Image: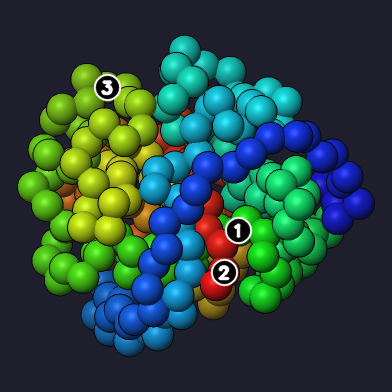
Amino acid sequence: MTSSDTTTPRLTAGPLTAIPAGEVVLRDEAAKTDRRAEVAAFRLAPYPVTRELYRAVVGAAPAGPAGPRTPVTEVSWLDAVRFCNLLSRATGRQPCYTTGTDPDAQDVVCDWRADGYRLPTEAEWEYACRAGTSGVRYGELDEIAWYRDNSGGEVHDVATRTPNAWGLYDMIGNVWEWCWDIYDAQVYGPYRTFRGGGWLDRPRGCRAACRRKSHPTLRIDDLGFRLARSG
């Protein structure tokens, strides 16, 4: 994957939700530490990227039996970055990412001033997930999320559970979502973070503060992503 990719499919992206500026306390459960982060105003998609949108932009979606309105899965962090750049070009926006050839994706750079699509940061993701709440999650688990106890062992269409107070669906459950951040460079090297819990997870994995990580080339059936934009 290189920054010379010039594929420009023609389509219209759906509206993103305006998220107001604020702050969030991020809990590192492994290190037992808290970090307060300021979050500038930004925009976030109301639900994860679907298989139908991914296919429209990229030309094909990963093989699988799930329907067009389910979150796309089996996409790596690098796949998500490439998608963001393709969608930005297709909608006349400035791509956020400059990419290179490093298999660990350590040469990917984000221009936070660009008006194109990108992945949310961890702070943006958790701040938007909480939507002004401070509990374990923003509502009753069975009402807001598809998870191990109610999913029937499969991914579900987006926006079929109760949204949070800011109108965001599936922030908890259905699929995990890639974020921009490196998890812990000193311990895990290039591993990137994902958030939110998925259709196969028990309640402990479906919490606003729960963090997981993997190599940016990982593809798995309960991990997708959600679009963000600066400003």
Quadrant of res 52: top right
Residue 118: assigned label: 1
Q: Residue flagged by tag 1: what amino acid is it?
A: Arg
**Which of label 1 and label 3 is nearer to you?**
1
The C terminus sits in image quarter: bottom right
Q: Nearer the viewer, residue 195 or 51?
A: 51
Q: Is residue 101 above or below residue 203?
A: below
Indicate the secondary structure of the residue bearing disc 1: loop
Write down the residue under mark 2: 230
Residue 105 visible in this rendered orientation of the protein: no
**Which of label 2 and label 1 is nearer to you?**
2
Q: Residue at x 16, y 57 (%)?
A: 138
Q: Residue flagged by tag 3: what amino acid is it?
A: Gly
Q: Residue flagged by tag 2: what amino acid is it?
A: Ser
Task: Return the residue found at the far left.
Answer: 140
Q: Is residue 87 above or below residue 122?
A: above
Tell me where residue 213 appears, x and y as whole percent.
Answer: 45, 56
**Which of label 2 and label 3 is nearer to you?**
2
